[in-house]
Amino acid sequence: PPSLPVAANATFELGATWIHGSNGNPIYHLAEDNGLLEETTDDERSVGRISLYSKNGVAYHLTSSGQRIPKDVVEEFSDLYNEVYNLTQEFFQNGKPVNAESKNSVGIFTRDVVRKRIKDDQDDSETIKKLKLAMIQQYLKVESCESSSHSMDEVSLSEFGEWTEIPGAHHIIPCGFMKIVEILSRSIPESVIQLNKPVKCIHWNQSISKEIEQVADHNEDHVEENAGYSVLVECEDCEFILADHVIVTVSLGVLKKHHEDMFYPPLPEEKVLAIQKLGISTTDKIFLEFEEPFWRPECNSIQFVWEDEAEAESLTYPEELWYKKICSFDVLYPPERYGHVLSGWICGEEALIMEKYDDETVAEICTEMLRKFTGNPDIPKPRQILRSSWGSNPYFRGSYSYTQVGSSGADVEKLAKPLPYAESSKTVPMQVMFSGEATHRKYYSTTHGALLSGQREAARLTEMYQDLLSCKN
């Protein structure tokens, strides 16, 4: 994993950072059993899945005029926002009907309800009300980064409560989340893992017979072995791999972009519709390393509250204002491990714009933003910058999935359903299977959802072969 030279022993996670919850979380138990864990947050105050206060300090909410919002105002707003967040869960959990005004959108519902409650509060001055109104958009940006949506306006209100949080504290893995992958791969012989081998097309069902001669030409030594396989994987390097079953684990972003040319015959319409309906966007991180900290020791994050957004409806910005979508910079803790490093968050279309710029430009814009919000014009440019680019990465095309307005958990089930659909004595069942976080109805967007979905598909195959063996016996 990439590291900044100043902190040679530290790992900077460009991807997954937290193990979300512990009780029954397979990633947590895997990490715990292998001595990888470190607890980072408690359950005191949180915004959705985000901790407002962590054990190492307090969030600083700063305005675009360079002022810190008083802690008591932040706490009052946070309590109100969390009340409304809990209401958003009830539509799915209690089957509450969604009113037409919300357009079945988490963002629209949250903004309308929180805004009304702030305006109706007799105890607050107009100045405090304006601050709280501006904080709505900042909190929604934070939540968008968590959901990996362009905006919370695009997240389905009626389905939002199906995402399930595993109880327990969040944890990080100081030596890097990649360790989990290494542990999982230990039991797989190295000879069967092929890297740097992109797949061009998966030929399944009857399409294989048309390709069998081609395979024979390419794999002359194995002509006899070719018979009886139901799936042919065509790689970009022109090699063909024959298989009984293929488990597809690519992201929803890759499926959206390539499903038409990635499968032959084409995917059933029901599955294509599920791919189109479900949402995925980009959440990126921007790490900035400074010579010395310009923040106070108790500050664990800098949250950007734009005062001109108090009455804003949309969170889409002109291309040149992409930086207004950066919701915050977290302080990496402890400094003894990481050095003086901030980790910024940006999502949606603006993350894709950020990815197009060079490091120098992004570092400069972030520094100007930090100067503006802290009111400190002397903040130096960072020593180094490191950032992710999940949106433009052709093998990801986004970070992780969410239930978009117009989609539901049923679409997740359709995405996960193995091919072919029709059961027949003439066709081999479960030729093409699907796993990955986007195929888990309750735990989408998480590493444990991804792992559990893989175990689910492995169990399908195991059960099928056990049934076949018991029938023969």
Image (tube, rainbow, N blue to C red):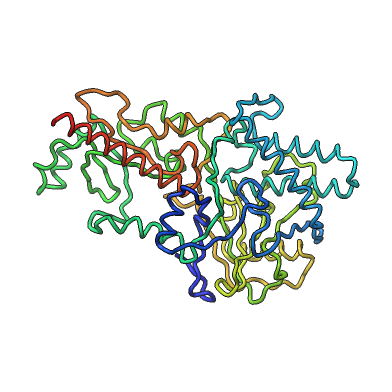
In which quarter of the view is residue 423 placed? top left
4 relative position to 431: left or right: right
Q: Where is residue 332 in the image (x, y as percent from the top left)?
A: 60, 66
Total tally of numbered discs in the picture? 0
Looking at the image, which is closer to me, 150 or 182? Answer: 182
Q: Position of residue 364 (x, y in %)?
A: 66, 66
Q: Residue at x 80, y 36 (%)?
A: 116
In which quarter of the view is residue 95 placed? top right
- Give the quarter of the figure containing the C terminus: top left
274 relative position to 234: left or right: right
460 vs 29: above or below: above
Q: Which residue is drawn at 64% across and 62% down?
A: 55
- Give the quarter of the figure containing the N terminus: bottom left
Q: Which residue is drawn at 46% across and 29% down?
A: 273
Q: Which residue is drawn at 8% across and 41% down?
A: 224
12 vs 353: above or below: below
Q: Where is residue 472 in the image (x, y as percent from the top left)?
A: 14, 30
40 relative position to 425: left or right: right
Looking at the image, which is closer to me, 256 or 113? Answer: 113
173 relative position to 230: left or right: right
Q: Position of residue 21 (x, y in %)?
A: 53, 50
